[in-house]
Amino acid sequence: MKPVRPRLGISSCLLGEPVRYDGSHKRDRWISATLANYVDFVPLCPEMAIGLGAPRPPIRIFGDLGNERVIGADDPKLDVTEALETHARIMAGKLPDISGYIFKHGSPSCGMAKVRRYPTNHAPPNRDAQGRYAGVLMEALPLLPTEEEGRLNDPALRDNFIERVFTYQRWQQLIRGGITPQGLVDFHTQHKYLIMAHGVAPYRVLGRLVSQAGATPLTETATSYITRLMPALKKPASRKGHANVLEHLQGFLKKNINRADKQEMAELIQRYRRGQVPLVVPLTLLKHHLRKHPHDWVANQVYLEPHPSEMMLRNRV
């Protein structure tokens, strides 16, 4: 059975649609040429949706921090603040099955952070605002993995975002299929080392939570679990975190590989920890030994392949 591809909301201009204020686009090469092979996009443009059209008068964020308005750059009487907020709330209710969202950076509607804000005293603009549509949508869907296309040029942030997207999609599939106490336990078991790579503290907290799966209302436990899991995964795993997980996984092979193989594995992990090789190097050797000496429990660990290996995201982290 062919795996179901995650569905991602995305700013339409990033896919090459001519919806910018000047009728142009901002097609992103990696998103269009690479990511498109692994996900299905739901292209969205709030400015077009609220009837501004393209080309259109440019808009910008104006006002003091906390009291911003989204108005026309040349016509202050054009105020689309409420229209963008209303549209974001409507879309939040219509997009329950998306597993992530990629926003256009710097946009007064879609920028996640550091968007230009023009103060009322006519001082130079500050980069301290948030696009009004993006802000309301993210507030309505706080667990949804989100990122800006510019930040996806950072290998660690790219790996982290796609990891969160596929994790969230697996959770959505679990919920749609009808969650059970055993289903929650299995989900956590498969993600244990992925969580550990992001921190021992969330690993312990989530483990304790799952241990109560049969003693507390399941809906309550599941909600508590996912509201802790997604924020825990948001911070990219460090080399120290990955090295810790690799050492744990190597431990499952201690009775199957000889001393020289153990030493080689340990040395590669330390070279990775020091930043001398990317994660894919020790991970590839670990997978090689696991193929020769299969271990069912380890084989089911999402950490080994949290997203399609063909994307080669771990080649640069």
Image (cartoon, rainbow, N blue to C red):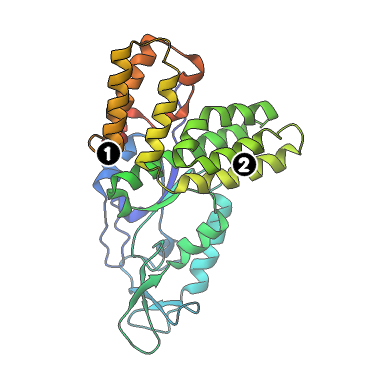
In depth, the one of 174 and 297 nearer the eye is: 297
Location of residue 40 by image quarter: top left
**Identity, as a three-letter code, of the amino acid under mark 2:** Tyr
In this rendering, does residue 306 appear at all? no
Q: Judge whether 97 appears above or below 80 on screen.
A: above
Label 2 Cα neighbours within 10 Å, binned few <14 / some 14-19 / many ≥20? some
* Element assignment for label 1: loop
**Quarter of the view holding residue 212:** top right
For label 1, count other residues whose C-alpha is less than 10 Å away and answer few (under 14), some (14-19) or many (20+).
Answer: few
The residue lying at 30 percent from left, 20 percent from top is 263
Residue underneath mark 2: 225
Return the mark for residue 274: 1
In this rendering, the count of numbered labels is: 2
**Residue 1 to residue 121: above or below:** above
Q: Nearer the viewer, residue 225 or 277?
A: 277
Q: Residue furthest bottom?
A: 121
Q: Earlier in the sequence, mark 1 or mark 2?
A: 2
Q: Are marks 1 and 2 in contact (CB under 8 Å)?
A: no
Q: Position of residue 80 (x, y in %)?
A: 46, 74
The residue positioned 34% from the left and 88% from the top of the image is 122
Residue at x 38%, y 83% (from the top left corner): 119
Q: Position of residue 128 (x, y in %)?
A: 39, 71
Identify which residue, 124 or 90, lies in the foreground.
124
Instruction: Residue 300: give x, y in percent of width and height.
Output: 49, 21
- Dot 2 lies on which element? helix
